[in-house]
Amino acid sequence: MTKPGEVYRVDLGIGGKVRMMLVVSRFDEAASRALSLCVPITSSYRDTKYEVELASAHFLRTKSFANVQGLQAIQDHELDGPVGLVYGDVFVRVKEALRYAMEH
């Protein structure tokens, strides 16, 4: 069971690339499926409202960003970790970027 703000490694099967993913879904022990909503962490920045700069952390090798346009449902058994945590004001900004992405 994952918690919001946790960071996991996920093999997305894209050319054998393992990517860091940030869990953004709520903690729900009664969820009917073992899925977590996650956004990818990337070092590629395109200066959009869909990207949130992450604070430096031991699990990030370079300056990194949460890209909310890449929102994906990941099966919990595919998540390797957690390897870190994003919290506080940075996680609030990720949630704001998600709200922006979902607006009409």
Image (cartoon, rainbow, N blue to C red):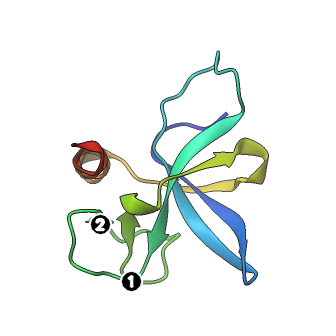
Per the rendering, the mark at residue 51 is 2
Is 81 positioned to the left or the right of 40 in the image? right
Displayed quadrant of residue 48: bottom left
In this view, the residue in front, 21 or 88, is: 21
Question: Badge 2: how crowded within 10 Å, few (<14), some, or many (20+)?
Answer: many
- Secondary structure beneath disc 1? loop
Note whether 67 is above or below 18 in the view shown: above
In percent of width and height, residue 45 lies at 31, 81
Q: Which quarter of the image is occupied by the N terminus?
A: top right
Give the numbered dot on residue 80: none
Tell me what residue is drawn at x 69 percent, y 68 percent: 12
Tell me: residue 101, above or below residue 57: above
Q: Quadrant of residue 43?
A: bottom left
Q: Is residue 8 left or right of residue 27?
A: right
Q: Residue furthest front?
A: 104
Q: Is residue 64 above or below residue 44?
A: above
> Residue 65 in the image: x percent, y percent?
36, 70
Quadrant of the snapshot with the C terminus: top left
What crowding class fits label 1: few (fewer than 14 Cα within 10 Å), some (14-19), or many (20 or more)?
Answer: few
Please report the residue visible at 55 percent of the width from the left and 60 percent of the height from the top.
Answer: 21
Mark 1 and mark 2 lie on one chain; the one further toward the N terminus is 1
46 relative position to 19: left or right = left
The amino acid on which the numbered mark 1 sits, given as a three-letter code, is Ser
**Mark identifier at residue 44:** 1
Residue at the spot x=66%, y=38% of the render?
Answer: 35
Q: Amino acid at mark 2?
A: Glu
Q: Is residue 92 above or below residue 80?
A: above
- Spatial CA distance of label 1 from label 2 is 10 Å
Name the spot of residue 15 as percent of width and height, x first. Answer: 73, 84
Label 2 secondary element: strand
State the residue lying farthest toward the top. Answer: 30
